Structures are given as structure tokens and as C-alpha cells.
Image (cartoon, helix red, strand yellow):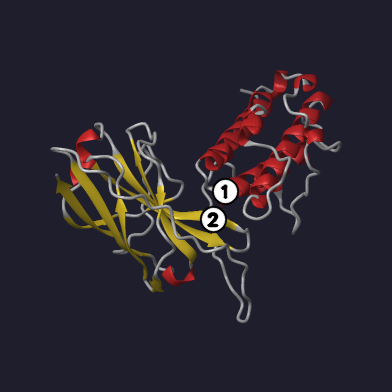
Amino acid sequence: MSEKSKQVAKWHGAFKKATDFDSWGQLVEAVDEYQMLSRQLRKEGSSESRTFTDDQKRILSKVSTCLDLRSQALQASHGSSLEESLSLEELKKVEPMLKNLLNANPEEFPVQVSHFSPVRRPTGPEVDISVLNLDGEEEEEEETRSEGTTPTTPKPTSGSLLPRLPPEPAMTNLTMRIERIGLKDAGQHIDPYVTVSVKDVSGIDLTEPQDTPIASKKEDPYVYFNVDVEIQRHVEKMPKGTAIFFEFKHYKPKKRMTSIKCWAFMEMDELKSGPASIELYKKPTDFKRKKLNLLTVKPLFLELYLTLTKD
């Protein structure tokens, strides 16, 4: 494989990583990846670059613009929405052009970028693009607050919890009380909540995901919820390989977005009445449970209380 082919393959991998974050709802991570890849493509698409042909540079510039348009749309989604913004589905149409860059025709570019709102390029210090690592995982940046400053926070939410399932003969209802989560920087998280979802072995939703209300209390090293989540499928109707996922989310005022801090899950053989403490994993959430990286080696867990009731 030539050096150009290797570079294109890396870009394609970064594109997939960014769109995966986007599809999972991890908007902060998606924006970071989109902006990082856009800078690289914009650099190689410039007139000063001698690596690629003029047609290839035209494609790189258009892909970079699409990445910026999607990033702009995601950042606007937390406040006023854009009437005309690039959707994830439209962005994915661009993927083959990047993947097959060395043989692609710029005249066949699938998105008319001129139809969208002008792109606001990210501002700030220049970045040495040549040393950015597209293959590595970045540590979550620490959010700091200067004394006397008040970040703009989203409107508090009461959550989207659903009522208890109607009783059925010989069927078991599952109530999961989320008591608290242990984090080393618990008190720093703004408007934290947990999204609970039930998924099959392939990571497909079996029920509608539910959001808890914002945490009732933060007292290091814990964030307290003390809220009941009624699982929307009877235990006996859960297929083999089902797992229940918990994603701890919080608001980042600097980026005006909600981000996932960590996640946890329980499998069917763990569903027993009584207290449960389950391990926390680093993002991104892997609903297929293939890549599990502990968040910390400290004895900090998601603490639950399960109630199984058979009617």
C-alpha cells in the first residue's frame, strides 16, 4: 500500500469514528473528531500541498466543508436550530468519496455544499496537524470554572421516565433504582443524568431509552439520583444476550453540549433482587460489549437496587 493510500485509509477510519459518535448521540466527541479531521483535509486540500492532484484536493476541500457544516449543525442543536443544516445521513453520502479518493471524480460529489449555511471555521490557536493522532483515544478534557463566572446551562429536565408495565400472568417486572454513582470529580459535573436503555446482543434497542431527572445531589465522590426506572420489557421476554445499559451524561458549558462521561451495563444473569454495584467503563459506549476499558481502578461504582416482581 502506498503512502497516499495509507493516509486515505486513516482519514476514512477517522471519518467512521466521527460519524459513529454522531449516531450514538455523543455530540461533543463527534464535533472534536469532525473538526480535527477537517483541519487535516483542509491542509492537504490547499494549493500549497503537493501530495494530491488538483481533483483530489477539490474533493478533500469539499469533504472538509461538509465536516465543518455537520459540526456547526451539532453545536447549534443545543440552542437555536439551523433551518438548513447538514444531516448525518447527508454527510454519510460523502464517505465513498473520501474512501475512494484516489479514483474519485469531483464532479460526482454527492452533496451541494453551497445549499447550506456558510461555514464558521473553528477559531483559536493554530494546530500542528501533522502530529495529530487519528488512531488514538483522547482523554476527556477537564472543565474548569473561574471564581465568579457562571456558565450558561441548559434548561433543567425532569427526565423521560416511563410508568410501570401493566401486569401479565407469570411475567416479571423489573424496577431498577439508581441510587448513586461514584466519580473522583463528582461535584464538577453540571446537570448530570443517566440514560437507561435495553439492547439485544447486537446493540439494538428493545425498548425506548429513558432519561432520569437531573441528579438530586452531588457530594464528592458521589452523584446521587435515588430514582426508580421501570424497565419496559418483562424479564421473560428479553432475548438471550440482552443487557441493560447506563450512560452517565453531563453538560459542558464551554461547548454547549451534553457529553457522556462513562457507562455501565448489567447482563441477564445479574438481574437479581437486591443491591448491586457495577463497574464503570470509559467512553465511547460499546453496546456490543466488545471493548471494555475500566474508567478507574478505584472502588467507585454505579450503585443500584433491583426489584423483581412476578404477577
Q: Amino acid at mark 1?
A: Leu
Q: How many marks?
A: 2
Percent position (x, y) of residue 39? 72, 44
Which of these two is toward me, 92 or 163?
163
Residues at circles 1 and 2 in contact by the CB criterion of under 8 Å: yes
Q: Amino acid at mark 2?
A: Thr
Which quarter of the picture shows residue 187? bottom left
Task: Give the left or right position of residue 15, taking residue 59 as reference.
Answer: left
The residue lying at 38 percent from left, 53 percent from top is 161
Percent position (x, y) of residue 20? 53, 38
Percent position (x, y) of residue 139? 51, 55
Task: Give the left or right position of residue 165, taking residue 138 as reference.
Answer: left
Report, in whole angstroms, how far the alpha carbon at label 1 lies from the one at label 2. 7 Å
Please determine whether, in this image, residue 185 is positioned above or below residue 207. below
Quadrant location, the N terminus: top right
Residue at disc 2, secondary structure: strand
Q: Which residue is mark 1?
A: 27
Q: Residues within 10 Å of mark 2 (few under 14, many from 20)?
A: many
Regarding residue 7, the answer to whether it shows in the image is no
Label placed on residue 239: none
The residue lying at 35 percent from left, 46 percent from top is 245
Task: Give the left or right position of residue 10, taking residue 97 as reference.
Answer: left
Q: Earlier in the sequence, mark 1 or mark 2?
A: 1
Q: Which residue is mark 2?
A: 258
Percent position (x, y) of residue 195? 41, 51
Q: Residues within 10 Å of mark 1 (few under 14, many from 20)?
A: many
Which of these two is toward me, 133 or 283?
283
